[in-house]
Amino acid sequence: ILRELGWSERSSSHAHYIFIRPVKYPKIRRKIAKPLLPFVDYSSKQFFGLLLRIRAYGYPNLKIEALTSDTLQKFVDPQKNSNSEVTTLRNWEYLSWRFLDSPEFHKYRIVSWKDKDQLFLIKLEPDEGIQIKHIEILMSLNPKHSEFVRQMGSLGIFAKAHDFNYLIMYTNDERLHQKLRQKLLSYPIYQIYAFHSHNNQMMDWLRNSNHSWEFMDSDFERFDPY
């Protein structure tokens, strides 16, 4: 329908679940016979725990700290404020409104690793009502394909130790999408990503430009799997 209306759609747009306890994911849980749930839960938790340890083997220990204005300042990215790609404007005014003024500010954390220049801004979501305890990866600083899988393995080990059931992140980077599937056996769910302009020149620019989006660029942080 969108294409018929003149919109363009990109195929690489996925929310990725990186599992620790996949049985906690409702769509998976519903497919398992009830008598088998304890066995599948135990064995899958052991399997994914081992996979995360393998991917993170030899990587520096992570550090997790509360979000502050000083740590958020590091995410102000001049490249995100240019015309070189299609993305959210990440200046201080936007980031401080988006995170420091958020009613869920107390859930935000900064993840870092010794001697690494990558940072992640994450959100710790507790068991709350029908919500399942999980970690959302909202924003990254200086992400590198060569480091990303190992960093997710490291964060996954932390998540397992603190009884989180999965990590979730969004990417429209096709290469990273494939890496997450192959190396961490993530479960990707396609997210419709479409754009349109009545200006033909602008549409050509949008079609040929690099698009860079993360979870924090959405109006809705929560992505319920029900």
Image (cartoon, rainbow, N blue to C red):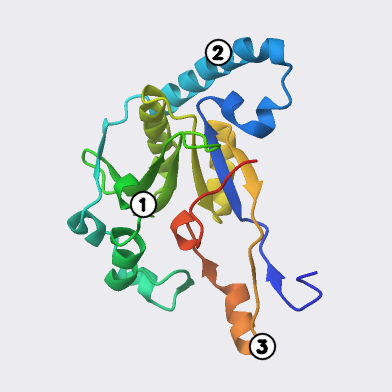
In this rendering, is residue 15 above or below 44? below
- Looking at marks 2 and 3 on the same chain, the residue that comes earlier in the sequence is marked by 2
Other residues around mark 2 within 10 Å, as few (<14) / some (14–19) / many (≥20): few
Residue farthest toward the left in the current orientation of the protein: 70
Viewer-closest of 172 and 64: 64
> Callout 2: helix, strand or loop?
helix
The kind of residue on which mark 3 rests is His
Horizontal arrangement in the rendering, residue 120 relative to residue 21 (left or right): left
Which residue is drawn at the image coordinates 23% and 61% (left, top)? 73
Would residue 108 be visible to someone looking at this image?
Answer: no
Residue wearing tag 2: 42
Q: Position of residue 97 (x, y in %)?
A: 32, 67
Horizontal arrangement in the rendering, residue 105 relative to residue 226 (left or right): left
Residue wearing tag 3: 198
Q: Position of residue 41 (x, y in %)?
A: 58, 17
Q: Which mark is residue 64?
A: none
In this rendering, is residue 73 above or below 133? below
> Callout 1: helix, strand or loop?
loop
User: Marks 3 and 1, how far apart in space?
Assistant: 37 Å
Viewer-closest of 41 and 145: 41
Q: Which mark is residue 104?
A: 1
Foreground label between 3 and 1: 1
> Callout 3: helix, strand or loop?
loop
The kind of residue on which mark 2 rests is Tyr
Q: Position of residue 184 (x, y in %)?
A: 53, 32
